[in-house]
Every structure is written in C-alpha cells, then in structure tokens.
Image (tube, coloured by chain):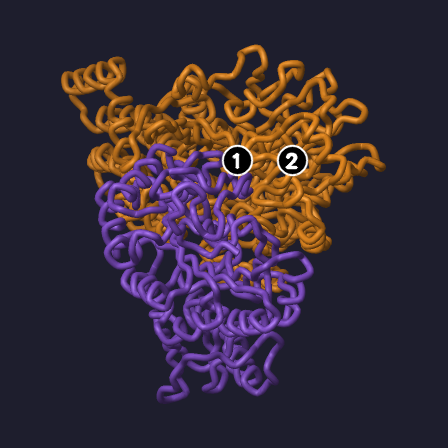
C-alpha cells in the first residue's frame, strides 16, 4: 500500500502555478525571440533548446529552495528578460535595422532565458520536494502539465483578442508576486494596481516606449497588436515604414515595386478583367491598375491599417482578410490573373507561397488562358547557392504545373506562367504592346523591357535554372535557416556536418546505448534512458508540428499557445494515468512505460510522411498523442526518484533538447523527415526490447 | 558494466570517431599543396614574402598576412606554398550589358553601354551591400563562366558596348583580370571604367590608372566610424584614392549611398561637400543615391526623397557644380544642368538619356565647358 497522498494540494497548486507561468512566459518570449531573429521560425528550435537546457540545469542543480522565494525572483526576471529582447540590438551595439548575426542571437537568447528558465527548473524540484508521500516527482509533473494546459489555452485566446506581449509579461509578473506573497491584504492591492495599469493602457505606453528605443534613430510612430503578430510603424520624412514583429514589410509609398508587380502581368495579358494580388501591398499597385480591371487583395489581417495614412488604405470591397491558401482553397470565381510577390526567403511563412501545393491551388483558380505571375528578389542574376536552390525549386514547381513560362530576369525575377503551351510573347510584340498601353514611366518603359529581356541575360538566367533541385518533402528544406546563415557565411560548415553519415552514426550509437543500458548494475539507469527517449520524441513532434502548421496554415504565432496547450493536455492525461493508475499487467506496463507508443507514432509518421499529409488537424492530433506518451512515460519511469525529483525532470528536458537539435540541426536542412522518423522508431524498438529483456 | 565505465568508453569512442577527420584534413592539405594549379588560379601581383612562407598582400590597405593554403579577407587570393595567387582570373560570375548611367557615370560617354563584369569576393563587408550574393561569397560557392580578357573585349564589342565596366562586386580583388582586360581593351579600342569602393593601396592604383579611362568611387560615408562599423573598412585610404585619381587626371565620379539614420545628417553632408570642394574641386560629380534595403540592412526604410534633395542642396551651396540624385526614377536632379546658366543639358529618365544638348563638351547657351568625356 503506497503512502501517496493525492490530496497534497500544496504540491498540486505549486506545480500548477509553475506550469501556468512557465508556459505563458515561454509563449511570450518565443514570440519576441522570433521577431529578434528576423522572423525566422526555425530559430525557435534554438530558443526551445536553450529553454530546456537551462530549465533542466535548474531542476538538476537546485534541490530545495522555498518556492515562494523563487516565485519572487521570477516576478523580477520575467519582465527583465522580455525587455531585453526589445533592446538587444541597442545593448550589443548593433546598427539600427541590422539583422542580428547568429552568435548575437544566441547570446541574446542565452542572457534573456537563463535566469527565467533556471529559476523555473529549480521551482519544479523545490515544489516537488515540498510535497508529501511517494511519487512526488510524477505528481508535480502532472500538476505542472495542467497549469501549462490552462496557460496554453488562455494565451491563445489572449493573442486572438489582439493582446500585447508586454501586457502578458506584466500580468505574469503580477501572478508570480501574488503566488509568492501570502497575506491577502497585500495580494489584493497588488492585483488592483496591476488591473488599473492594464485598463488605463499603461502597458501600451510601456511597450511603445521600448519600441521607441528599439527603432532609434527612426521615428517610431505607433504599434498595434493583431491576431497573428505585432505591427509597428516608423516615419522618416514623407515615408511610413511598416514592420511585422520587427521585420520590415514595406515603405509607403513605394512606386517602383508596384510597377514591377503589376506592369509585367499586365503587359503579358492586357485584356485581363480581374487580378488577385498576394503579398503586394495595395498602395504599390492600386493606382497603376486601370479602372476596368477588378482587383482583389488578399491579406491575412488588416489591423495594421490604422498605422498608415488614410490615403494609403485599399478600397474595402476589394480586400479579403484571409490567408492566401485559405482564400484560394475556397474561392469559386476564376481569375484572369494572379500576382504573387514573394519576399526574402527567411521564414516558412514566405516559403509556403512557393510550394507546389499553393501554386497548384493558384492554377485551379485561374480561368482558361489566365496567367500566374510570381516575382522574387533575385539580385539581377547574381545568385548565391541558397538563392539558386530556391529559384530552381520554384521554377521546377511552376514547370510541373504550367506548360508556358516567360522568365523576366532582373533585380526581381518574375515568372509569368500560362496553361497554354504555345504562349510565349516575343520581345517585339511586348514592346509594341507597351507602346499601345502607353506604359512610359521613367522606370517602366520600352528600353527597360528590352534590357530585361535581352538574349544574353535570358540565356544566363536559363543556364542558372538548369538543375534538378527536387522538392521531396514540405519540410525537408531549410531555406529559411540556410538563407539566414548564408548571409553571415556560417552555413556551409553546418551543412557539411548534417549528412546521412551523421544520421547513420547517431542511429548506431543510439541503438547500442539502448541495447546495453539494461546491463547496468544501477537499475535506475534504464528508466532514465526511457525518460530521455520520451523527451526526444515528444519535443521532436511538437517542433515539427509547429513548422508544419506554419507552412500549411500560416498561423504558428497565433497557435503557439494552442499547440503547446494541446501537448500539455496530452501530458495531463498521460501523467494522470501514469501517476494514479497502477498497471497490473507487466506487458502493458512495459508497453506504456517504455517506448512502444512513441515507436508506433513514429512508424506511422514515417509512413504517413511519404504521403505528405496536408491537414493541420493531423499534426494537432499528433501533438496531443505525443503529450500523452510523454506524460505516461515520464510518470511511469520517474516513480523511483522520489529522493531526487529534479533528476528525471532534468533528463526529460535533456531529451527534449536533443529532440529540438535533431529537428533543426539535422532534419530541416538536409535530410528528409522520413529517414529520421525511421531512425527514431528503430531506437524505440531497441529500447522496448531492452525493457522487455530486463523486466521483473 | 558500471555507469562510469560506460561514459568513459563512450567518450573515448567518440574521440576515435573524430580522429580520422583530423588526420585526413592534414593529409588533404599536403595533397592540395602538391596538386597542379587549379583552373582560374593566376599569379597575383602586389605582395611581399615574409618569414615561414607567410605572405603579406599589398593590394589593399587591409594588408592581410596569409599563411600557406589560406586566403586573404577577400576570399579570392590564396597563398600556395609561399606563392600568391588570385583564384578568380577569368572566373566571371556576372556579365551584363548595362547603360553607362547605371554605373552611374553621368559625365562619361552618356547614352552608351558598358559590358559589365564581376567575379566573386570583396575586401569590404558593407552591411547594406546590394550585390552581397556575389561579393560576400567565395568563388567556389558561386556558378561562374570562363571569360578570358580577350573574350571579354570581344564580347563587349559584339554587344555594342564602347566600354567594359568592372563592377557589381569589388574589382580591386580581381585586379589582375581587370588589368589584363583593360590592357586588351586599350589595344582593341574598347574603353575601361572602374566601379570601386576605392579601398586600394597606392601602388596598384597608380598602375591601374594607366589602363582605365574613368573611375567611379563609392564613398560610403564621410565618417571613419561608419566605415569601421558598417563596412569593416577605413575612410582615409578611400579619400587618398580619390585624390590620387583626381591628380592623375582620370575621369572621376563619386557615389554616396545615403542610408537613413546612418550617414544622412546635415553635418556629414556639409563636411563631405567642403572636403570635395577643397580637395577635388567643384567639377567632380557626386551622386546622392537612394538606399533600398538589402543584405543585413533589410529592416530600415528606403531613403526619403527629401533627404536626397537636402543633400544635393547642401552640396550645391558648398560650391559643388554637379550633385545628382540617384535611384529616384524621373527625378529632376537625375538630369544634368549647366552650372553657369542652369540650362538642362542632358535630360535623363531613369537610365535612359532622353536628350543630350551638350555640343563639343560645351553648353549650347553660355558656351561654358562642361567637365566630362563626351565622345
């Protein structure tokens, strides 16, 4: 009969608070960290890696401190960490507007995360120690998972309502204080003051003050927090510059890009009756489009309007506030032309507009004889390897969908595609058309067309487009990260490391370790290996799901809390099951407590990945399943560590760290996910065999 | 097996796995030194041999000290066994036919075309580089075509260009190729124009000025701090270059890329204009060019038109005769006006010359000589 005390409310509440605060802080800091890295989502993995590392360190090194003291420290360090992200470039002397180099990003994230994570790791250990009876670590884990689940749901709702990051940070600091300070007569005034500040917009003032420093020497105008992301605006003389979470979107006004975007498709199909623009800020093109052509602008959201002058708003009736993928999936009316303007390839959000999936959706939306125009920054034919890879892949996607493609080389490379294989407008015809349409602006004119379409340039471009860059899998492509790092010359060494050889070596080492881990004299080693393995699997799935959801739906920022919340929901179930339900059947115990569930998940994933599942719900479901497996695996295996609850927790987080590293370091860049899923399922099988061999 | 023993053997195993790499890399090095010279490698000029096979490159003020099998900062000049080589001779990664106005040269054969070539590499690292995709990479990372100096001249002639422009990346780093092309061009009647940041030593510059016909220098800023922080270079060598070119009588134009918030203060425009006037005279055209975000500086606004207008107004008030605005298509200040009577002499629309009124190098109204090379 165990002396477990399920009514140990002190432990449950303490770990609930910890889970709630920890996950909320993770969401808000992750959003800030991604904007610091120029919008590159892949950097999230580095963020999570460091998060797990420092939390694991805290859990491992701090044995027992009064949780109250640690909550007070958290109340101090959470705002400090958040503020640091706003000011990092200034603190480290980075010139205004410069993309931070990888080492600076790493350093900034380390400095920002270390105190918060270390304290929250230590809190886990301390909270668990303050519990009574057997299975403290498992119960603390369960309580933490519930707190994190609630936090995931609330942060999602909060961001859906357009909440500001800094508001959430203030709220969290206040919650930490309220948890730490026992007498009610102090708690109540603290909460009242906080509410007062929030209601009267103190938080917005604070965030704007930070942004003002962040954007110096440019004049910060205002910011608005929207469903997906925060938008800021700065002004310099007659220009307004719009930023999405710190990454520049566009200058208002900017005529040149507008002419590039609209005049080329217009020249190719002057008889068009309607055109849809994706990624072209309306102010660039709207005044160029003749009145008889109906235009449609597709934006994911429009709260940023209020940062601009009224004259720069598009006509409301032409705007669809939808994700482009969702728009083209549901659009019934066929269009004569679609224009896609791609940005620099830094993020999955950009990449998703170049996938075969999206381009075929566009094709389905075109009327017979319609054209698709897609333009990307291309440095006048001077392509470095990562850019070339991107363009060749795009070209390959287009070729598989459209028989007729006209290439327009230049600073922006434009592909104009038609479903008519005989469609190939010649230069002379285009010049004549240009004259007839009276396109004679200082920028876009006959000589400009001739210089862009001269044989020498075209030949050079076509030569560069030769190649067989495949798009084997939606995710087995690290353009964002590769492109980002290539700007600092830091990519090529990493790519050399991430090879099939590395994967095979790691696989062999992994299998050997798991097979011999049953031979150790210390019988607690195998449970730790199990926990480590669960950590890897659970986080690997979570990160992959995040990336997939961004590529498929483009709402990762919004869904950060929801995805983590789902993971935590699974973990609550799993941890509850593992903590409070005893398994009588040894086989069942081994199946659930060792590695069978992750093994099955990864085998299924490996097979399904071959089909490239494109439903977001599939990934959400998987996240939940991974959570259940993780919670169950942890609590089943951590029962023998009551005297050292931080140890299994630290090992779990170390496994998660390895999961994040694998997800980016090896997979995204070079190797398809199928290979890694297979490798992990093989290790899982080996681990199951070891558990079975040493049962009893 | 004990846990400690297991950890020890794992670490030892990992060490053994890594060892062949080190052994292999030193073997590789030895083999590379013994190999015949690879394609595109060509003996470099302007260097000194130091002790222990180290070479000091004397092409640019950086003066890199390069050990055996290593390269200088530019990434295109390599020490092989104590001899110095350029790795980009005839290794052209970009070749285009551009209007000379795109370079920009406004007082040098307006309305003509230049066969523009570049190789990989640069001796600066400007955070806003428009051509970073070739300038900040090693030649091996970028696809290239082989165009020998004689082929380059031939292609220029065939494409109707009166000049060859060494441009896009930094021509200083492909000095030997540029020098030979310019020499070949001179024999064949094809002119050569250099588009450079001017970060070059005096001796190679002096030799180069014998074979080129016009030079455009990108003066990034008039602040040494800016050069150091944003470009990883220094200001003084560039100013020395400007003075040398002017003193040698080679046609010179200057571009000043106005980056918002970084080099756009009135103070800097005034100091710059004063220096230009005092050291180069009033007739060297200066182009205040609009910045479009690129490379690592993608998060800043483009230059407001009013800033560029302010810059030209200051330059003019300091006595500079030909300040221009660049990259603002259709702007009035893209055109050339007589500095005496104010008549519009060359009407430009973007890179096109819509009208050229200069007759025999003079203003048709007041007959004053307009500095430049007109035909």
Pick the residue in front: A242 or A211. A242
Pick the residue in front: B273 or B112. B112
Label for residue A187?
A: none
Pick the residue in front: A60 or A397. A397
Instruction: Residue A466: name its quadrant.
Output: bottom right
Pick the residue in front: A104 or A96. A96
**Protein chain holding label 2:** A
Against A82, residue A313 (above or below) is above
Q: Are marks 2 and 1 in contact (CB under 8 Å)?
A: no
In the picture of the structure, the residue carrying the numbered disc 1 is A627
Q: Residue at x 70, y 26 (%)?
A: A436
Q: Is residue B276 left or right of residue A370?
A: left
Of all chains in the rendering, the one displayed in orange is A
- Residue A238 visible, this angle: yes
Q: CA distance from mark 2 to mark 1?
A: 40 Å
- Residue A30 visible, this angle: no
Q: Quadrant of the N terminus of chain A?
A: top left
Against A35, residue B97 (above or below) is below
| x, y percent for residue A446 | 64, 37
Of all chains in the rendering, the one displayed in purple is B
In the picture of the structure, the residue carrying the numbered disc 2 is A374
**Protein chain holding label 1:** A
Q: Secondary structure at mark 2?
A: strand
| x, y percent for residue A139 | 40, 34
Instruction: Residue A196: name its quadrant.
Output: top left
């Amino acid at each position: 009969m165990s002396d477990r005390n399920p009514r140990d409310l002190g432990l449950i509440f303490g770990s609930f608070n910890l889970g709630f605060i920890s996950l909320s802080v993770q969401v808000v800091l992750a959003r800030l960290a991604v904007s610091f890295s120029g919008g590159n989502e892949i950097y999230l993995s580095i963020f999570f890696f460091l998060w797990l590392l420092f939390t694991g360190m805290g859990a491992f090194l701090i044995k027992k401190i009064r949780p109250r003291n640690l909550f007070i420290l958290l109340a101090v360090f959470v705002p400090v960490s958040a503020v640091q992200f706003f000011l990092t470039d200034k603190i480290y002397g980075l010139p205004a507007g410069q993309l931070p180099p990888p080492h600076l990003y790493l350093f900034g994230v380390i400095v920002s995360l270390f105190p918060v994570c270390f304290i929250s790791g230590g809190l886990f250990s301390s909270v668990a120690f303050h519990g009574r009876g057997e299975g403290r670590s498992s119960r603390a884990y369960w309580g933490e998972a519930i707190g994190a689940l609630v936090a995931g749901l609330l942060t999602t709702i909060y961001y859906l309502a357009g909440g500001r990051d800094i508001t959430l940070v203030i709220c969290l600091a206040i919650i930490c204080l309220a948890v730490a300070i026992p007498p009610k007569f102090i708690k109540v005034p603290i909460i009242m003051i906080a509410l007062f500040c929030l209601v009267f917009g103190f938080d917005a003032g604070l965030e704007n003050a930070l942004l003002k420093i962040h954007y110096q020497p440019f004049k910060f105008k205002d910011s608005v927090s929207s469903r997906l992301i925060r938008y800021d605006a700065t002004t310099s003389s007659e220009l307004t510059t719009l930023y999405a979470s710190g990454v520049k979107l566009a200058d208002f006004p900017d005529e040149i890009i507008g002419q590039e975007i609209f005049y080329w498709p217009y020249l190719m199909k002057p008889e068009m009756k309607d055109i849809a623009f994706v990624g072209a800020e309306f102010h660039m093109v709207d005044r160029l489009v003749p009145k008889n052509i109906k235009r449609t602008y597709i934006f994911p959201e429009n709260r940023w309007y209020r940062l601009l002058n009224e004259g720069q708003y598009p006509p409301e009736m032409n705007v669809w506030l939808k994700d482009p993928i969702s728009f083209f999936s549901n659009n019934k009316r066929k269009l004569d032309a679609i224009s896609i303007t791609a940005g620099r390839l830094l993020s999955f959000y950009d990449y998703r507009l170049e996938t075969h999936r999206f381009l075929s959706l566009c094709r389905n939306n075109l009327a017979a004889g319609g054209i698709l125009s897609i333009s990307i920054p291309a440095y006048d034919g001077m392509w470095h390897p990562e850019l070339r890879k991107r363009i060749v892949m795009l070209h390959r996607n287009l070729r598989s969908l459209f028989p007729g493609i006209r290439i327009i080389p230049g600073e922006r490379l434009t592909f104009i595609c038609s479903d008519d294989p005989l469609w190939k407008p010649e230069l002379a015809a285009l010049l004549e058309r240009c004259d007839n349409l009276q396109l004679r602006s200082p920028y876009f004119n006959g000589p400009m067309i001739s210089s862009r379409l001269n044989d020498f340039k075209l030949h050079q471009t076509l030569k560069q487009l030769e190649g067989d860059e495949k798009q084997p899998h939606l995710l087995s492509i690290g353009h964002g990260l590769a492109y980002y790092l290539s700007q600092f010359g830091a990519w090529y060494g990493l790519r050399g490391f991430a090879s099939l050889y590395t994967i095979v070596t790691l696989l062999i080492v992994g299998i050997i370790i798991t097979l011999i881990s049953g031979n150790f004299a210390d019988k607690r080693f195998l449970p730790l290996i199990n926990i480590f393995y669960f950590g890897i699997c659970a986080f690997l799935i979570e990160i992959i799901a995040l990336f997939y959801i961004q590529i498929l739906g483009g709402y990762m920022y919004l869904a950060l809390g929801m995805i983590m919340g789902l993971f935590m929901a699974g973990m609550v179930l799993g941890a509850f099951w593992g903590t409070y339900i005893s398994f009588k059947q040894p086989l069942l115990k081994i199946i659930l407590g060792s590695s069978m569930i992750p093994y099955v998940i990864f085998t299924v994933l490996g097979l399904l990945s071959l089909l490239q599942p494109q439903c977001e719900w599939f990934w959400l479901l998987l996240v939940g399943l991974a959570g259940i497996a993780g919670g169950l695996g942890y609590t089943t295996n951590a029962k023998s560590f009551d005297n050292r609850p931080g140890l299994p927790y630290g090992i779990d987080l170390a496994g998660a760290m390895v999961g994040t590293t694998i997800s980016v370091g090896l997979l995204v860049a070079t190797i398809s996910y199928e290979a890694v899923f297979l490798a992990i399922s093989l290790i899982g099988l080996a681990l199951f065999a070891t558990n079975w061999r040493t049962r009893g | 097996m004990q846990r400690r023993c297991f950890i020890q053997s794992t670490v030892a195993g990992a060490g053994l796995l890594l060892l062949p790499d080190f052994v292999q890399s030193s073997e590789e090095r030895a083999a590379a030194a013994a190999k015949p010279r690879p394609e595109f490698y060509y003996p470099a000029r302007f260097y000194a041999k130091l002790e222990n096979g180290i070479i000091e490159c004397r092409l640019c003020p950086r003066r890199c000290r390069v050990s055996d099998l290593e390269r200088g900062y530019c990434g295109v000049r390599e020490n092989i066994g104590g001899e110095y080589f350029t790795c980009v001779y005839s290794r052209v990664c970009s070749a285009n036919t551009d209007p000379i106005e795109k370079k920009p040269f406004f007082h040098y054969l307006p309305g003509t075309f230049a066969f523009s070539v570049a190789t990989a590499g640069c001796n600066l690292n400007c955070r806003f580089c428009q051509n970073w995709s070739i300038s900040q990479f090693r030649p091996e990372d970028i696809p290239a075509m082989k165009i020998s100096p004689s082929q380059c001249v031939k292609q220029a002639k065939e494409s109707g260009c009166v000049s060859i422009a060494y441009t896009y990346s930094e021509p200083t780093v492909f000095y030997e190729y540029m020098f030979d092309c310019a020499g070949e061009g001179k024999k064949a009647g094809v002119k050569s124009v250099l588009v450079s940041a001017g970060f070059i030593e005096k001796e190679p510059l002096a030799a180069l000025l014998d074979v080129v016909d016009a030079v455009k220098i990108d003066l990034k800023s008039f602040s040494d701090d800016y050069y150091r922080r944003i470009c990883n270079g220094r200001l003084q060598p560039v100013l020395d270059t400007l003075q040398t070119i002017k003193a040698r009588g080679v046609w010179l134009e200057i571009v000043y890329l106005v980056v918002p918030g970084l080099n756009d203060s009135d103070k800097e425009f005034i100091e710059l204009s004063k220096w230009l006037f005092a050291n180069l005279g009033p007739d060297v055209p200066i182009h205040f060019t609009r910045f479009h975000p690129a490379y690592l500086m993608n998060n800043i606004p483009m230059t407001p038109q009013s800033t560029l207008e302010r810059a030209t107004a200051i330059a003019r008030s300091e006595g500079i005769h030909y300040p221009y605005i660049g990259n603002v298509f259709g702007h009035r200040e893209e055109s050339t006006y007589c500095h005496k009577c104010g008549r519009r002499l060359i009407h430009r629309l973007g890179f096109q010359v819509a009208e050229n009124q200069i007759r025999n190098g003079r203003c048709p109204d007041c007959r004053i000589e307009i500095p430049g090379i007109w035909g």
